[in-house]
Amino acid sequence: MKPIPDAVNKISLSTPATTTGNGPELTFSSTLDDAENLEQLGPVIKQITESGKQSAFLDQLDALIRKKDGEIERMCNAHYQEFVHAVDQLLKVRQGSVNLRRKIADVNTGLQARGKHLTEKKKELIEAKRVQQNVDNAIEALKTSLVVLELANKVNQQLDEKKYYSALKTLDGLEHDRLREISNYSFTQRLEKGVPVMQNTIKGTVTVELKEWLARVREVSREIGSLAMQRMQERQDRWRTKTIENPKLKNLQHHNVNSAIEMVVNEGQEFSIDFEPLYRCIHVYDTLGKRHEFKTSYEEDRRAQANLALSSPINLRDGNLGPFQTLLQDIVGFFIIEHIILHNTSEFRSQLNKFNPKTNKQVDALWEMVTSKVMMVVSESLKGCRDPELFLRIKFSLLIFIQTLEGFDYFVKPLQETLLALFQRYSELLINQYSEVFEKIVQEDECMPMTVEKEDELKEVMQYTRFRPDKEFLKLHGFPLRLPFSKVFPTCCRDVSAFVHQFYQFAEGFSQTHGEMDDILKKAVDSLLIKKVNAILLKKLESTNLSQIVQIIINIEFFESTCPDFEMLLMETRSFHRSGRIHLKATSTFKETRRKAEKRIFELVNSKLDEFLELSEYDW
């Protein structure tokens, strides 16, 4: 038996320790590892070669091989039975493995036959599932496509129904949700291109409708303004009636309409107008993200409408207030609409706080432009005018205009200042007018006792004076009745009362400055009585007609005694919040004039006596 090859690999040579006669003695070690054998083999072979002992080395190596073969043979003989038994077992295993291999081959053949059929079925199943998945995908795509097409049809339907805001919302959902799910289809791409076109179409449609609405609003603004001013006038009339008829409210008659007290007594009025086109346009532009563009466009349109309303020429000097009132009605209607839009929209129109006029906003920029035009029209038209009645009519129109828009929170202080300027000019004209009237009355008075022909004439005199004849006096003298004073006295009393009431006609509505007006009126009445009535009567005392001077004294006495009535008239008509008596300087002036008149009588009597005495001393 051949030795096991691995055993040779474990034998290693060692360097010779001794040398015998037959040659070097070779000692073999089996304890060295392969690396050490390799390291020692080189020097050994080199030494053998150099010493020429190759044959000895080979003989020694053969002896070692025979020794190892004998050891292997002995080892194999010791375990032979076990080896034979192992070989038998191995042969049996080999026979079993052959049988098993044959059976495995048969099983494999059967499995291959059956697997081929299953594979074909599996392929058919996979193909069927693939077809089914494609069908499912197609069905899902069709469903999504149908939803998209339904939404597209819904948009057209909403446009037909003028539901533009809903149509935009539908388009937005279509563009950002549905179309992205089926973005690979050609009709989807066409729909995507059509969405901006539809949005622009909706934008253009609502813009056109808004333009039409603005045109309609411009037409009805005058009616709205006229109705609002009419209702304000009715509120003024009701307020005036309530304050006159109700003793508890009498002291409140100088409160303005729109004041806190008046608003408690009277209920407010509301206006109604269809703002749907505007709100729809706001929603559409908001959805498209173009709110600023719409705000700018709307502002330009409204400013153009305001300029158009202000473009009509107006002349107040001819006394025709029709165009001016029409302008005021247009403005009231215009800004009532702006007020409603301002309070019914969010961040669309803006207005300043009337308590902080420096914060100029869109609506108030228009308001400032319009009020400046109104003030300019009034100022230019009344330049050089000397008709107080025209001032009064303009004042009533402006007052209604101011109070109407003040109720809608507009800043009206500049207009109120314009009214104050008008009042100053009006009071000057009124004083000048009545100065001329009083001067003419007193100058043309004949200083003769007044005669009334009938009872109605007497009642008219009694209406403006404190003269009250008793019934016995009337029975005794009857009509025509000779009165103690001349015609100048009742006429001046009547005109003083007319002057006071005409003065306060303009002052109505100026509760903030009513105290100043009270002072102006008191000074004006004093001026008329002192500088016109008293001064002319004083000048007439230069006459030498004793009967006229006597009549003048009687007239002055009546004027003096009537001054408290004038003071009472001023106290009854003045501002409610002022107290204390009013004292006219005319009272003391008339008293002083009466003394001068009495002195003048004594002078004339003495003169007559002197003339008589001179005549008596004449030598007949």
Image (spheres, rainbow, N blue to C red):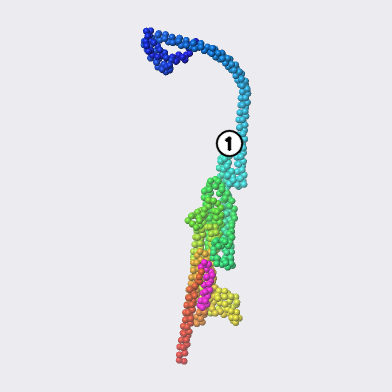
Which image quarter: residue 32? top left
Residue 561 included in the magenta stretch of the image: yes
Q: Residue furthest top?
A: 22
- Residue found at x 43% / y 15%: 30
Q: Is residue 366 above or below residue 599?
A: above
SS assignment at label 1: loop
Question: In the figure, is residue 336 to the left or right of 40?
Answer: right
Residue 39: give x, y in percent of width and height.
40, 17
What residue does disc 1 label?
185
Residue 160 seen in the current view? yes
Given residues 315 and 329, the one toward you in this image is: 329
Report whether residue 544 is seen: no
Q: Which span of residues is magenta-colored?
A: 556-578
What percent of the width, then of the height, locates residue 91?
Answer: 56, 14
Asked if residue 178 is positioned above or below residue 401 in the image, the reply reads: above
Location of residue 106 by image quarter: top right
